[in-house]
């Protein structure tokens, strides 16, 4: 195991799921586990959420669905991005549910399903204003008429996605919601009974119970982040990124640090090297902007972030090789969470979390074990 690890608190993930579950009072939950479960580990998180009662799992790509099936996860899985015609066989083979937004692709899917004697479950995507995927509300009738003739497909969901559920001004969300409601009514009037009507991501879920419909689709809130600045659920982050000091030196005034010597010491100071870099998802843009935690204090990341290493200016703090460094998470009374890293990166917490690369080993611990794991990390020999 390398010095840099992502410690994932599985008990906290369970807690977060339960908090959401209780809040939505019996609505079905599609747990969004795409992008390696926002960096927390696809297989592990999907299994935790399935055990906790998720009605469905949401992935972005068919490959992620296949990974879950190969790991033995039997939960219903919806692939959230529009499918390609050539993926039809995989949807059948791995029993994945598809987003429907193109008639020609659905004709292809229906043909493949008939050939194999199975049915592909589909969720009709309605574009109410996100303009990313889905059919125009006006095209719904035509789509449904064709769907009636197509054997091999089963319409189980009707959904839309909000463009701005996390913005203080919710007027566009309500425009989208009204359009979606009209479509839902038209689909019902056309004689379709669709079990899953869904729209709410984390922000809509937390703010607007009116949008819960029959299924909610939380992502970020399950991983412990508040989806917007207003109402809060008592969820907490479940992932920390920790490392260790692997080298240490004293600089003289005028000494430069890392590529291009962007940082030049103005006075005598100590800099330490930490083995994490942009290839781990610790972005280049963090150089000269981020801080990390050592001895429970904040110290600046100085100079350019390298592919595998960063340099931290610890001033006169007596830091030694092997000392723990927290890049994301808590140490003593201090904490750095993905929102703060995102500010330094000019980004959003979603990118911070999902961008944590697979090169960083994930260490899964429960709440009680977290401290043991920390001690293990502290007492493990330094890797120099
Ligand atoms: C279609 C869809 N539904 C739900 C989500 C979950 O969003 P959030 O993480 O904001 O809850 C996403 C995430 O991007 C998404 O693309």
Image (cartoon, rainbow, N blue to C red):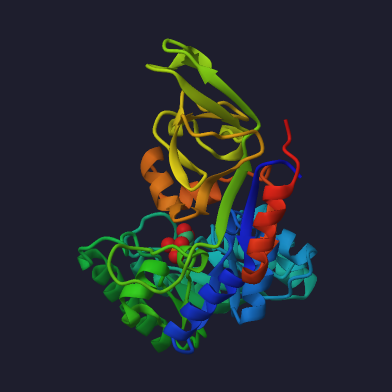
Q: Position of residue 198 (x, y in %)?
A: 44, 76
Whether residue 108 is visible, yes or no, is: no
The structure residue drawn at horizontal position 43% and vertical position 45%, both measured from the top left corner, is: 341
- Tell me: residue 343, above or below residue 365: above
Residue 306 placement, left or right of 177 = right
Pick the residue in front: 316 or 242. Answer: 316
Q: Position of residue 185 (x, y in %)?
A: 36, 84
- Tell me: residue 175, above or below residue 307: below
Pick the residue in front: 248 or 25. Answer: 248
Whether residue 283 is visible, yes or no, is: yes
Q: Quadrant of residue 131?
A: bottom left
Q: Quadrant of residue 230?
A: bottom left
- Tell me: residue 260, above or below residue 138: above
Please identify the quadrant where the C terminus is shown.
top right
The structure residue drawn at horizontal position 36% and vertical position 74%, both measured from the top left corner, is: 206
The structure residue drawn at horizontal position 39% and vertical position 80%, both measured from the top left corner, is: 212
Please identify the quadrant where the N terminus is shown.
top right
The structure residue drawn at horizontal position 20% and vertical position 63%, both measured from the top left corner, is: 169
Q: Position of residue 150 (x, y in %)?
A: 60, 74
Q: Position of residue 214 (x, y in %)?
A: 46, 84
Pick the residue in front: 233 or 4. Answer: 4
Q: How many marks?
A: 0
Q: Residue furthest top?
A: 254
- Tell me: residue 363, above or below residue 303: below
Residue 164 placement, left or right of 315 = left
């Amino acid at each position: 195991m390398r010095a840099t690890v992502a410690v994932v608190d599985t008990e906290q993930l369970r807690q977060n799921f339960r908090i959401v579950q209780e809040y939505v009072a019996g609505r079905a939950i599609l747990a969004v586990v795409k992008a390696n479960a926002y960096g927390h580990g696809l297989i592990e998180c999907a299994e935790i959420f399935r055990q906790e009662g998720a009605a469905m799992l949401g992935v972005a790509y068919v490959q992620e669905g296949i990974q879950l099936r190969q790991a033995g996860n039997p939960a219903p899985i919806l692939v959230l991005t529009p499918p390609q015609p050539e993926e039809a066989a995989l949807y059948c083979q791995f029993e994945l549910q598809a987003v429907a937004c193109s008639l020609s692709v659905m004709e292809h899917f229906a043909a493949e399903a008939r050939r194999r004697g199975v049915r592909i479950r589909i969720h009709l995507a309605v574009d109410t204003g996100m303009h990313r995927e889905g059919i125009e509300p006006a095209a719904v009738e035509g789509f449904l008429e064709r769907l009636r003739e197509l054997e091999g497909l089963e319409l189980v969901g009707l959904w839309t996605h909000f463009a701005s559920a996390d913005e203080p001004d919710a007027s566009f969300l309500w425009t989208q919601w009204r359009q979606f409601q009209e479509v839902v009514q038209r689909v019902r009037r056309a004689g379709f009974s669709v079990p899953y009507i869904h729209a709410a991501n984390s922000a809509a879920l937390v703010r607007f119970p009116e949008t819960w419909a029959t299924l909610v689709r939380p992502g970020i809130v399950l991983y412990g982040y508040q989806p917007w600045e207003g109402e809060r659920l008592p969820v907490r982050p479940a992932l920390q990124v920790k490392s260790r000091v692997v080298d240490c030196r004293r600089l003289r005034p005028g000494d430069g640090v890392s590529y291009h010597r962007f940082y030049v010491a103005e006075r005598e100071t100590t800099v330490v090297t930490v083995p994490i870099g942009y290839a781990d998802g610790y972005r280049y843009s963090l150089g000269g902007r981020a801080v990390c935690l050592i001895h429970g204090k904040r110290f600046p990341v100085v100079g350019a972030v390298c592919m595998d290493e960063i340099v931290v200016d610890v001033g006169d703090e007596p830091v030694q090789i092997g000392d723990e460094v927290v890049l994301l998470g808590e140490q003593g009374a201090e904490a750095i969470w993905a929102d703060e890293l995102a500010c330094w990166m000019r980004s959003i917490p979603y990118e911070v979390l999902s961008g944590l690369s697979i090169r960083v080993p994930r260490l899964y611990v429960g709440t009680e074990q977290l401290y043991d794991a920390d001690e293990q990390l502290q007492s493990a020999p330094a890797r120099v």
